[in-house]
Image: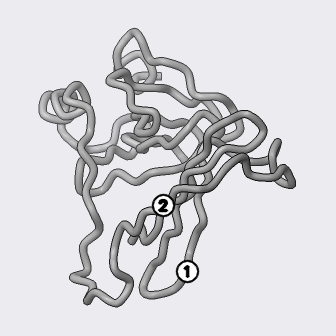
Amino acid sequence: MELVEVRFKAGGKRFKSTLISIAGYIFEFRLQPGGRYIAFAPWEGSPQTTLLDDPMRQSIGKRKSATVLPAWVAYLTKHGSSPSAGWTFYDEATAYSVSLDMGEFLILAEREGDEYILQRLEPPSEQPYYLESHDGTPELLLKGFETVIKK
């Protein structure tokens, strides 16, 4: 559950941090883009804080679903949601987000935890991305999902 969002500026760049809890415990303080270059830099100006959800609200056991790219929904409809060549596919109910230096991404598919098809959430993009390795940099996937899934 996303609890609080803090937007601030440091080192001449804008950042967004989100405080996340799971099962009532503080789990993650996500920073977008990654903050390794400004770890000890002072904030420039006052931060903007937004309460996203009430931590005292009774959990209904469902996480907020994300809206995935229409092209990905069409691919799943055409090819089915069963894995292909070691890939695991995710839909609106199962896709999950990760923070990378370039922003926040939704994982649409992954292969053995090292290759990913992504959707950029923050800043938003209608183009899918491909991440060849977990320590690589996401690149636009311009030639269609089949080019990486059929590898």
55 sits to left or right of 7: left
> What amino acid does circle 2 point to?
Glu
Q: Which residue lies furthest to the top in this view?
A: 143
Give the residue at mark 1.
Answer: 26
Q: Which of marks 2 and 1 is in front?
A: 2
Q: Which residue is depicted at the point 54% across and 46% down?
A: 112
Q: Which residue is depicted at the point 49% across and 41% down?
A: 111
54 sits to left or right of 24: left
Q: Where is residue 119 in the image (x, y as percent from the top left)?
A: 40, 34
Q: Where is residue 30 in the image (x, y as percent from the top left)?
A: 58, 58
Residue 9 figure quarter: top right
Q: Earlier in the sequence, mark 2 or mark 1?
A: 2
Relative to 41, does residue 87 appear above or below in the rendering? above
In this orientation, does residue 77 appear? Answer: yes
Q: Which of 29 and 119 is in front in this view?
A: 29
Q: Where is residue 141 in the image (x, y as percent from the top left)?
A: 44, 18
Give the residue at mark 2.
Answer: 5
Q: Position of residue 139 (x, y in %)?
A: 55, 21
Check disc 2 and report its element: helix, strand or loop. Answer: strand
Q: In which quarter of the image is the N terminus?
A: bottom left
Q: Distance between the residues labelled 2 and 1?
A: 14 Å
